[in-house]
Image (tube, rainbow, N blue to C red):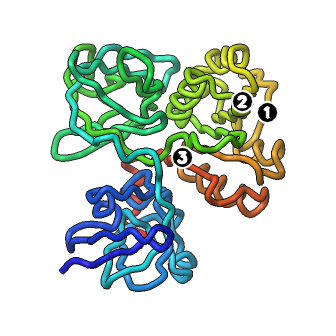
């Protein structure tokens, strides 16, 4: 049997079938709840049960702890109702008019800005008009029903191919092919298929608050898309971009960030390196990137934050910015880059 779910803030209602999660049911019925990884690893889709009961599928302890469960938390992506529900959830505004579709594409270029990062450019069919919001991602449709998700790195207004930033994960089903370490290696003119756009990580244009962007590694990709969109639209909100890596070559498009400092008013770029070696001769900021933000902005009460990267960075930023720097919880937007290995770990956590 299906159950009815009511959103407390708006009064909107939707029905959940026995074979789907709350998130799947909501999106199917045009109700946009926040989400990121869709597999219980990132915590972006966390809400609260006010009335009713759910069961949770596999998920990471970092995404939702036992203490969270005791307090009534739920993850929309892996929760299934066992009764009618009244829930507290932050609805996402702005993505309702964009249709999620399956799209063929051709590999236009494979560019290596560093040893372990590829910029993959995808050419769409000539008649294809692919709409997306800056910050959203696509999922490649691979063999055996497997999928791999990557954020779009160019702004929607830009002409030309879609741009993705892909870090090599040795042994990865898709990235080994991209980097040519297994056959068949991906090459220019190959045909791929993807589904998108997906995700609720995009700029909230109804706010005039200054923005802190926090990127780790290739978490820079969707943030690049948002910044380029803001620049194209001549938005004048102050921007602070913190980009963190283990070593300086992890900041694979740093020259672009320095160009933005020259071209974009009220833009500040702060690179942060955590594990520089003597031969790197690094003289800039060191440590964890989210901690550098806290040093510079001990009070974030008047900011919006957009964070993207590994779950450990995103979760640490979410918790510390709120508890120690007065950032309103509703002003933290995030996209966690979960790998297939991260997803596999959820199988042992519930």
Marks 1 and 2 in Cβ contact (< 8 Å)? yes
Classify mark 1: helix, strand or loop: strand
Count the labels in the image.
Answer: 3
Front residue of this view, candidates 246 and 128: 128
Please state the horizontal and vertical placement of residue 223, each as a whole percent of the image: 56, 33
Identify the mark at residue 308; answer none if there is no mark. Answer: none
Give the class, few, some or many, for how many residues have Cα within 10 Å of label 1's Cα (few <14, many ≥20): some
Q: Name the residue tied to disc 3.
A: 310
Say which of 317 and 233 sits in front.
233
- Secondary structure type for disc 3: loop
Q: Position of residue 217 (x, y in %)?
A: 56, 34
What's the CA distance linking mark 1 and mark 2? 7 Å
- Image quarter of the C terminus: bottom left
Q: Quadrant of the N terminus?
A: bottom left
Side of 247 where 191 appears, left or right: left
For marks 1 and 2 on the same chain, the one whose residue lies earlier in the sequence = 2
Q: Quadrant of residue 5?
A: bottom left
Residue 158 location, quadrant: top left
Residue at position x 36%, y 66% in the image: 78
Q: Secondary structure at mark 2?
A: strand
Return the x and y of residue 82 as percentages of the image width and height: 30, 83
User: Crowding near pointer 3: few (<14 within 10 Å), some, many (20+)?
Assistant: many
> In percent of the image, x 77 and y 42: which residue is there?
292
Residue 236 drawn above or below residue 11: above
User: Could you say which disc has been placed on residue 285 in the image?
Assistant: 1
Residue at (30% x, 28% y) in the render: 130
Earlier residue among tags 3 and 2: 2
Could you tell me if the residues under marks 1 and 3 are in contact, i.e. CB atoms within 8 Å? no
- Residue 287 image offset from top left, x and y in percent: 75, 41
Check disc 2 and report the residue beneath it.
271
């Amino acid at each position: 049997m299906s159950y009815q779910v009511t959103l407390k803030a708006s009064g909107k209602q939707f029905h959940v079938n026995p074979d789907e999660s709350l998130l799947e049911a909501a999106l199917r019925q045009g109700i946009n709840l926040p989400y990121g990884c869709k597999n219980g690893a990132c915590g972006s889709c966390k809400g609260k049960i006010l009335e009713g009961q759910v069961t949770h599928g596999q998920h990471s302890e970092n995404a939702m702890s036992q203490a969270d469960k005791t307090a009534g938390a739920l993850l929309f992506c892996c929760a299934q109702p066992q009764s009618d529900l009244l829930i507290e959830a932050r609805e996402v505004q702005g993505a309702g008019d964009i249709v999620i579709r399956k799209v063929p594409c051709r590999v236009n270029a494979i560019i290596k800005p560093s040893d372990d990062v590829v910029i993959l450019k995808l050419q769409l069919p000539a008649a294809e008009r692919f709409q997306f919001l800056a910050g959203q991602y696509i999922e490649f449709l691979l063999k055996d029903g497997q999928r791999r998700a990557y954020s779009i790195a160019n702004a929607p207004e830009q002409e030309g191919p879609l741009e993705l930033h892909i870090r090599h994960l040795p042994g990865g089903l898709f990235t080994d092919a991209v980097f040519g370490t297994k056959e068949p290696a991906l090459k220019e003119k190959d045909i791929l298929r993807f589904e998108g756009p997906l995700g609720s990580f995009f700029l909230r244009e109804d706010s005039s608050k200054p923005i802190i962007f926090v990127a780790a590694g290739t978490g820079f990709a969707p943030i690049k898309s948002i910044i380029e969109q803001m620049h194209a639209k001549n938005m004048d909100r102050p921007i602070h971009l913190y980009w963190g890596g283990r070593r300086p070559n992890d900041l694979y498009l740093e020259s672009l960030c320095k160009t933005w400092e020259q071209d974009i008013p009220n833009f500040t770029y702060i690179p942060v390196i955590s594990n520089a070696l003597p031969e790197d001769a690094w003289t800039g900021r060191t440590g964890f990137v989210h901690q550098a933000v806290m040093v510079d902005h001990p009070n974030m009460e008047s900011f919006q934050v957009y964070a993207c990267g590994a779950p450990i960075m995103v979760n640490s930023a979410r918790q510390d910015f709120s508890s120690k720097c007065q950032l309103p919880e509703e002003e933290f937007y995030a996209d966690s880059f979960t790998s297939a290995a991260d997803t596999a770990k959820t199988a042992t956590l519930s």
